[in-house]
Image: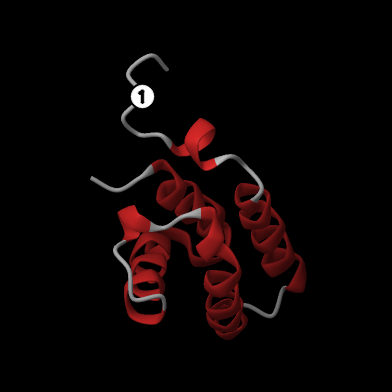
Amino acid sequence: MRGKLYYEIVTAASDCFGPTAEKIIYRLITSHLNIKPEEITPKDIPALLVWAKLVMSLYTDKQHTIDRFTDNVRSLESKSTEETFNIYDTNS
């Protein structure tokens, strides 16, 4: 099972990548960060953004789309891991 952070990143990437967002984000995380998608943490976001922005620039020339993605994903970085991404919390 993949974590909430992973799916929030995929959702943010959907504006640019459309239905291929999950496949692309999965590959970026596993190939360039060398971790499993369920292991991604807010601390991994800066490195992910470097690769994601590079790939996005190949898909679109719309800088506002890339900026929106970057802003949305950066906002996830500042959220508390325990509070926001605890997938085992059954009280939510």
Please give left or right for residue 65 compared with residue 9 in the image. Answer: right
As drawn, the residue found furthest toward the top would be: 91
Q: Quadrant of residue 50?
A: bottom right
Neighbourhood count class around disc 1 (C-alpha, 10 Å): few under 14, some 14–19, many 20 upward: few
Q: Position of residue 63 (x, y in %)?
A: 75, 73
Q: Position of residue 30 (x, y in %)?
A: 32, 73
Name the secondary structure under disc 1.
loop
Q: Nearer the viewer, residue 66 or 78?
A: 78
* Quarter the C terminus occupies: top left
| Residue at x 55% of width, y 60% of height | 43
Q: Which residue is mark 1?
A: 89
| Residue at x 62% of width, y 77% of height | 60
Q: Position of residue 26 (x, y in %)?
A: 34, 66
* Quarter the N terminus occupies: top left
| Residue at x 52% of width, y 71% of height | 48
Please give left or right for residue 1 compared with residue 89 in the image. Answer: left
The amino acid type, in three-letter code, at marker 1 is Asp
Up the image or down, 33 lies above or below 54; here it is above
Up the image or down, 86 lies above or below 30; here it is above
Q: Position of residue 29 (x, y in %)?
A: 39, 70
| Residue at x 51% of width, y 64% of height | 44
